Image (tube, rainbow, N blue to C red):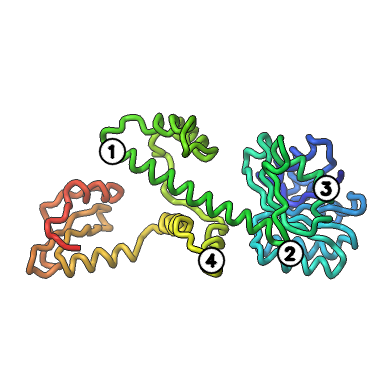
Amino acid sequence: MHLGLIGLGKMGGNMRERIRSAGHTVVGYDRAPRLSDVKTLKAMVAKLPAPRVVWVMVPAGAATDETITELAGLLSKGDLVVDGGNTKFTDDIRHAQELDGKGIGFVDCGVSGGIWGLDNGYGLMCGGDADHVKMVMPIFDALRPKGPRGEGFVHSGDVGAGHYVKMVHNGIEYGLMQAYAEGFELLLAKDIVKDVPGSFKAWTRGTVVRSWLLDLLVLALKDDPTLAQLESYVDDSGEGRWTVLDSLELGVPAPVITLSVQMRLRSQQEVSYAGKMLSAMRRAFGGHAVKKIDEAAKTVTVQEVQPGSAPEAALNTDAPAVPAHDEARQLGETGKERVTGD
């Protein structure tokens, strides 16, 4: 089978290689000339026999919109476009309608597997007309993991269903990752636990929490047992947010996924103004100890308010100064609250 593949980055490039290794012909196009098999999108289309199948693997949003609009002007009636990116399911419906006006079919396909998909295969979740899905099945079979088709591939439903299932998949992924992360931090904080990486490794066999994510975490801890080389900033790609928004739209509770998305947003903040506000209020109503940052010295001191005194009149000048990055540890060791309250 012949396939046009647009977008040859980390995922797309590996997919091209896996499809070719299964005996199919792939004509790849990428804006980066060093990755591309042809110079233009038009040249890629010209190399494909009719009916043409073109797989789009570019970032969701404007890039996908522009690519599909351009393909609508290059392809012919009976051709088919597959969107394998992380497009929002509502955009799929719009893309399908745009292409249908010219007699061009459309299938949306959520793809999971990341950089490991080249060797292990990709999990595929597609939506669209059954005849259109059948038209792409040789490519789906080349990409999915070895074994029964149903264990790695699903025709989820109508247009948009593939990306919707992938969206929820990613929401679940957020929750699983957050649970592992919290467990790691809890084990790391407990003094009687001496081998945190070993504990995680022991969970990889025979336990109910074993998973591929856990296997990857064990590999990461092997090289960096306390993850000291990493910042705590965690990006989010959009699907988690979309999952939460649609749970609200449908009235379906999703507290774990929602909190995991919120934790990622918190990690992206250099400063939490909500935290500052809470600290200010607790100091005002209960005289609780707070931390004051000296920007010039890049240090943190503990300020304590005695009962009955004004907050600003109680700077504890004897409190030891520590580097700002150790502020949490400093408060935990020397800044324990001495006034009861909320």
Q: Mark 1 points at which residue?
A: 190
Marks 2 and 4: CB-CB under 8 Å? no
**Residue type indicated by callout 4:** Leu
Q: 10 Å neighbourhood of mark 4: few (<14), some, or many (≥20)? A: some
Q: Residue 148: image x %, image y %?
A: 72, 38
Q: Residue 10: image x %, image y %?
A: 65, 44
Q: What element carries label 3?
A: strand
Q: What distance separates the C-alpha of mark 3 from that of mark 4? A: 35 Å
- Image-quadrant location for residue 85: bottom right
Q: Mark 3 points at which residue?
A: 3
Q: Is mark 4 on a helix, strand or loop?
A: helix
Which labelled disc corresponds to residue 245?
4
- Image-quadrant location for residue 311: bottom left
Q: What distance separates the C-alpha of mark 1 from that of mark 4? A: 36 Å
How many marks overall?
4
Foreground mark, 1 or 3, reads 1
Marks 1 and 4: CB-CB under 8 Å? no
Foreground mark, 3 or 2, reads 3
Q: Mark 2 points at which residue?
A: 66
